[in-house]
Image (cartoon, grey):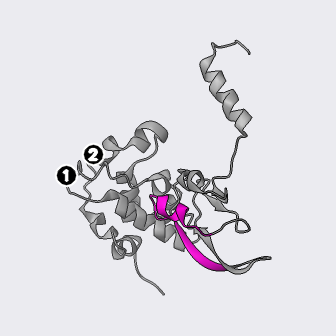
Amino acid sequence: MNNTTFAEEVKALPGGESLEMCYSCGTCTSQCMVQLKQEPEYNPRRLLRLVMMEMRAEAYTNPTTWLCSACDLCYPACPQQIHISSVITAVKQIASQNGIKTPLATSVVNQQTCVACGLCVEVCPYDAISLQVIKVPYRGAVPVAVVESSLCMACGLCGAACRSNSIGIPEEYSDLDVIEDIWSWLRPEGASL
């Protein structure tokens, strides 16, 4: 039986060793663009507190675990000089090892058309993509891009760089839906085209 605590697991991973240095001042949250612009529930200090209190399930489902882009705007502001993004990455890694999937719509590779040129690997700021030799139906064992969904932040850079159009974020909208959304923002309320 494993008697390792959640906090000990996080501290054992690279970047997680500074977990206990946080004294919950909230400076990281005040610097974070994710919290400010995208997700009001995003709060690194609360996530670290969940880890320290052995609240695994809550930490795994917390939006902070999955939305940290590792921009490190919080790092220079932290009075304890904690790389919060590294601690969050450690939590994310443990969640992934325990079978928890990211709630983000991450990049997907069409293995039939991927030519393994490596452009997506080069442009990915999160090191979420690698080239691996895998068995692909009708093609045999060939190198293709593989996305580690726990690291992918759904930025779309890979899809923009791919010359064979073999990787990208699954679209929730068609191009026409996006254009209609833009027009709805531009025209006065109640007006139609």
Q: Position of residue 105 (x, y in %)?
A: 62, 53
Element type where label 1 sits in the image: loop
On screen, residue 38 versus residue 100, left or right, reads: left
Residue at which label 1 appears: 79
Q: The C terminus lies in which quarter of the figure?
A: top right
Task: Identify the mark nearer the N-term, 1 or 2.
Answer: 2
Instruction: Confirm whether the magenta stretch covers residue 124.
Output: yes
Residue at which label 2 appears: 27
- The residue shown at (69%, 12%) is 190
Query: Label 1 is placed on what type of residue?
Result: Pro
Q: Residues within 10 Å of mark 1 (few under 14, many from 20)?
A: few
Mark sitting on residue 19: none
- The residue shown at (73%, 34%) is 176
Instruction: Please state which of residues 171 and 79 is positioned toward the viewer in this rendering.
Output: 171
Q: Residue furthest right?
A: 138
Q: Are marks 1 and 2 in contact (CB under 8 Å)?
A: yes
Instruction: Provide the residue span drawn in magenta.
Output: 116-134
Instruction: Please state which of residues 43 and 149 is positioned toward the viewer in this rendering.
Output: 149
Q: Residue furthest left?
A: 79
Query: Label 2 is placed on what type of residue?
Result: Thr
Q: Residues within 10 Å of mark 2 (few under 14, many from 20)?
A: some
The Cα–Cα distance between marks 1 and 2, rounded to whole angstroms, is: 8 Å
The reply to whether residue 142 is in sight is yes
Q: How many marks?
A: 2
